[in-house]
Amino acid sequence: MLRKLKKRIDSFIAHPNSQDEGIFSLLWQAMPYYVSRKGFSLFPKIIYLVVNSVCNLHCKMCDVGMNDKETYFYKNMVADARQELDPTRLKALFEEVKKFKPLISITSTEPLLYGPLLEVCEYATKKCGLKVSINTNGLLLEDMAEGLLRAGITRIVVSLDGPPEVNDMIRGFSGGFNRVLAGMRKIDRIKKQRKLRYPRFATIHVVTNYNYDSLDRIPDYFSGIDIEKFIFSHMTFITQEMADAHNRIYAHIYPITHSCIGGGIDPKKVDVEVLWDQLNKVKRMLKNKAFFSPTMDKEDLQKYYLEPDSFVGGHRCYIPWGVSQITASGDVIGLTRCFHYPMGNIYENSFKEIWNGDKLRRFRKDLRAKGAFVACSRCRGVL
Ligand code: SF4
């Protein structure tokens, strides 16, 4: 039990958007899970924003990059009606939530392609006193360096999936790795010249069957850049078999589709012995800067890749009690990897009305009764 709890906490801390929460803060946040039978929750610690619906890469492990339009992941990332969030509505949202100080985490689809990005970030940080984190593929970092530094962003999380040739093959963009690195170096250099504390850098490396054997070649490329966390994130996915097993039970309330397995992604092609060796190597190289999402021992690692429908780590999802995600059309959902189940829309209601509104409370009650659903086994919510 204690071992499991420690693993969940380690995995939480490894998360790029963890705000280095203390254990008491996490327990306080989790309290309504146990005491509110009606599905109420304290306001979220993190609000994720899908600010737009476009990307400039074609990553093999992403349904948007692979144009797999049938998946719920795609539908959560690419809006039908509105293609991007209205900056005026976003500023009003920041005003509304500033009292409970959530981290504003702008994750998708590719935030640096969102025209009003710097304007809304600056509003959140300087007018509302909020912390803002951005997850990016980094291609435009060099062009936008000055603006990003001015906007007061707390953390920039850059996705790179291997040494240059591996990364560029996975992401479908020749020369991409070096371009991203040039952008990171530029920001790092200016930051040091001006003695700025922010933005901090984290890198995230999604482990797949394309790169599991070359992870130890990644860290050297970043020498000289001040990086807070190197996060090795195991691929999250839903296979067709997992989706079918889930839908046999839950299709009438929370249907699901396969996701993030286009582009030749196949967890069973990962040689776990080699991966285990690689993870230990990067751990030795990076010491306390290496994070693994989720943290797993060798036995769980085997299960993770070879038995995708079995749960590793936890069997309970607390996501809708602690974080919220808003899509480009204004829908409030669980996570982009979660069900395509909008629980309200910020163009129709205030965030607070939605957060403890009927639909979200019903989802919390259903989820709490089950712990997690069949399709949850490779979602961050339970890892
Ligand atoms: S674990 Fe399940 S319920 Fe929780 S966020 Fe993931 S898909 Fe949604």
Image (spheres, grey):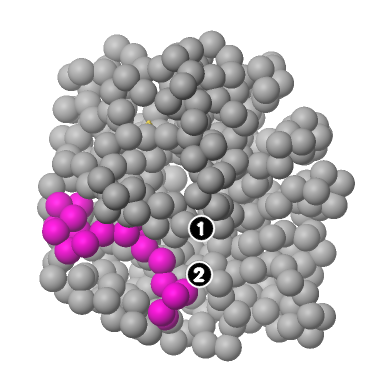
**Residue 49's disc number:** none
Q: Residue at x 45, y 27 (%)?
A: 33
**Along the line of sight, which residue is nearer the eye, 74 or 377?**
377
Task: Using the numbered discs, state the Cα–Cα distance from disc 2 to disc 1 in whole angstroms.
Answer: 8 Å
Q: Where 194 falls versus 124 (above or below)?
A: below
Q: Is residue 321 left or right of residue 380?
A: right
Give the magenta-colored segment's residue range. Answer: 286-305
Q: Label 2 amino acid?
A: Lys
Q: Majority secondary structure of the magenta segment? A: helix
Quadrant containing the N terminus in the rendered view: top left
**Along the line of sight, which residue is nearer the eye, 220 or 287?**
287
Residue holding disc 1: 16
In terms of image quarters, where does ligand 1 lie? top left
Q: Is residue 37 left or right of residue 61?
A: right
Q: How far across and how far down the image is residue 286, in percent? A: 42, 80
- Label 1, secondary structure: give it: loop
Q: Where 198 falls versus 342 (above or below)?
A: below
Q: Where 211 falls versus 37 (above or below)?
A: below
Q: How far across and how far down the image is residue 188, in percent? A: 67, 79
Q: Residue at x 47, y 74 (%)?
A: 289
Residue holding disc 2: 229
Q: Label 1 amino acid?
A: Pro
Outermost residue to the right: 127
Circles 2 and 1 in contact, beta carbons < 8 Å: yes
Q: Residue at x 82, y 64 (%)?
A: 150
